Image: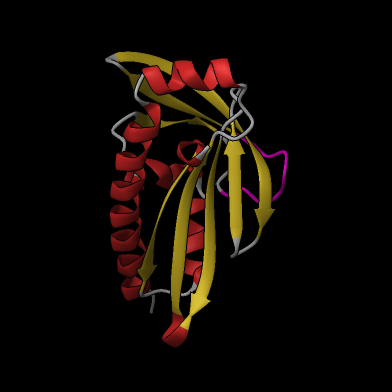
Amino acid sequence: MSDRLVSDSTTIDAPPAVVFAIVSDPRQHPRIDGSGSLQGVITGPDRLVAKGDTFGMDMKLFGLPYKIRNTVVELEADRRIAWRHFGAHRWRYELEPVGDGATRVTETWDATRYSAPVFAALRALGFPARNQAGITETLVRLKKAAEEDLAATP
């Protein structure tokens, strides 16, 4: 079961509102994507503000382009946001304020809703390990983006 929840965390020297502004804005996702699969935003609001909000992305996997539509399934402003597409897994960001205006961010790929055979197929395609690497790099990029945005704030 442990590889059904793949996550990593980092501390960002920016308050939760700055970090949340990035992860809740689909147009910012190409800026922070560490997986290499996200090609661009095709539809969606400027800001995801409620469960049920949707956004579309141009993606590429195994060299093949495709389009995906995501739906927000968890949202607590400045604290947590998660979305999913037609698959049962969720991408989640959890934000926790820590001392001196910083934020502890945990990104998780949550595949706990899949049946054993479906998850076995995902595992055979390398997804838990692939997602772990993408999450780690995304957090590096998110940290840089949030700290840049905070520094640019007058």
**Residue 51, magenta (yes or no):** yes
Q: Say which residue appears at 41% left-offset and 43% top-offset.
A: 29
Q: Say which residue appears at 46% left-offset and 51% top-offset.
A: 107
Q: Position of residue 81 (x, y in %)?
A: 60, 51
Q: Find residue 127 and report its image quarter.
A: top left
Q: Quadrant location of the C terminus?
A: bottom left
Q: Name the side, left or right, on which 126 lies relative to 75.
A: left
Q: Position of residue 37 (x, y in %)?
A: 33, 29
Whether residue 49 appears in this view of the structure is: yes
Q: Residue furthest front?
A: 1
Q: Find residue 100 and report its image quarter.
A: bottom left
Q: Name the side, left or right, on which 13 lies relative to 101.
A: left
Coloring scheme used = secondary structure
Q: Say which residue appears at 33% left-offset and 62% top-offset.
A: 143
38 is higher (above) or lower (below) than 145:
above
Q: Position of residue 96 (x, y in %)?
A: 53, 70
For the residue pair 27 and 24, the one nearer the viewer reads as 24
Q: Position of residue 119 (x, y in %)?
A: 52, 22
Whether residue 34 appears in this view of the structure is: no
Q: Say which residue appears at 46% left-offset and 57% top-offset.
A: 106
Magenta region: 47-54
Q: Name the side, left or right, on which 122 lies relative to 133.
A: right
51 is higher (above) or lower (below) than 116:
below
56 is higher (above) or lower (below) than 78:
above
**Residue 6, magenta (yes or no):** no
Judged by its main secondary structure, the magenta piece is loop
For the residue pair 141 and 133, the one nearer the viewer reads as 133
Q: Name the side, left or right, on which 8 lies relative to 98.
A: left
Q: Residue furthest top?
A: 64
